[in-house]
Image (tube, helix red, strand yellow):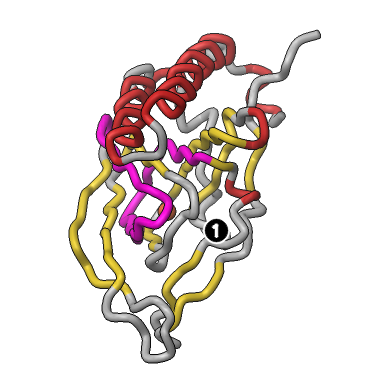
Amino acid sequence: MVDTFVHDPHAEERAAAVRSAMNDIGVLEADMGVTRAGVEAIRDRLVALVSHRHLFSRQVFPAPEPGARQRSRLYRISQGAGDRLALYVNSSEGASSTPVHDHTTWAVVVGFDGREVNRFFTHGEPHPDGGPGGPVPCGEFTVERGTGVAMLPDDLHSIHLDGAAMNFHLYGLALERLTGRRYWHEGDRVWKVFPPHSDIREARPLVGP
Ligand SMILES: [Fe+2]
């Protein structure tokens, strides 16, 4: 629990809105499974949560200070049993980008502020040693307020920001449990494995007695 949440007048309203959305998303996942239609329905439910804009201010979820080594900060705002259905607010400042990567679980990104360019890729011809081929561009979508993208576990994307942005990131399994996510190392032209994400701020509401 971070101190800023103690004085947040919208904490209870936000907790209720998040709880309602995550309950709905759990039902959608159970009913529709990990399918393209299922993750797109989950994305649409998260878009509805973004309409409660005043509950997710940059004062409550600040980006790193200017000059900090990291350009973005993740806040965990909900996580279900077994570390499933993990919802984060990602607050970023300045330009940044990621390499092409997968998630090994389904993933949804929905926008509050700013513009997050998502580039999508497929695997190219297999590597001569039999490994998966390098990424081949196949599309692009810019996540802005009230729009989002939904990805299945093997889908590939990269993210590109050119200024301040705030987004929801939602995963079928919590980021610290994702030990096998692969990213494309452009310099070595091989797939490598991301270390599990470790710098996540705890921002879930306190559970009462
Ligand atoms: Fe991603």
**Residues packed near mark 1 inside 10 Å, few (<14), some (14 to 19) or many (20 plus):** some
Residue at 56%, 42% in the rendered image: 173
Task: Tell me: residue 208, above or below residue 198.
Answer: above
Residue at 26%, 59% in the rendered image: 119
Magenta residues span: 145-172
Kind of residue at badge 1: Gln
Task: Tell me: residue 105, above or below residue 204.
Answer: below
Task: Tell me: residue 170, above or below residue 29.
Answer: below
**Residue 188 image position (x, y, % from top left):** 45, 87
Residue at 57%, 62% in the rendered image: 180
Please count the marks in the image.
1
Quarter holding the N terminus is: top right
Whether 151 is among the magenta residues is yes
Q: Residue furthest left?
A: 139
**Residue 115 image position (x, y, % from top left):** 27, 46
Q: Considering depth in this image, is 191 or 197 the residue closer to the camera?
A: 191
Q: Considering depth in this image, is 135 or 60 the residue closer to the camera?
A: 135
Quarter holding the C terminus is: top right
Q: Secondary structure at mark 1?
A: loop
Q: Toward which corner of the image does residue 128 lie, by quadrant?
A: bottom left
Q: Toward which corner of the image does residue 148 lie, by quadrant?
A: top left
Whether 185 is among the magenta residues is no
Q: Which residue is mark 1?
A: 70
**Residue 13 image position (x, y, % from top left):** 52, 10
Left or right, 65 with respect to 189, comes to right
Q: Main secondary structure of the magenta part?
A: strand
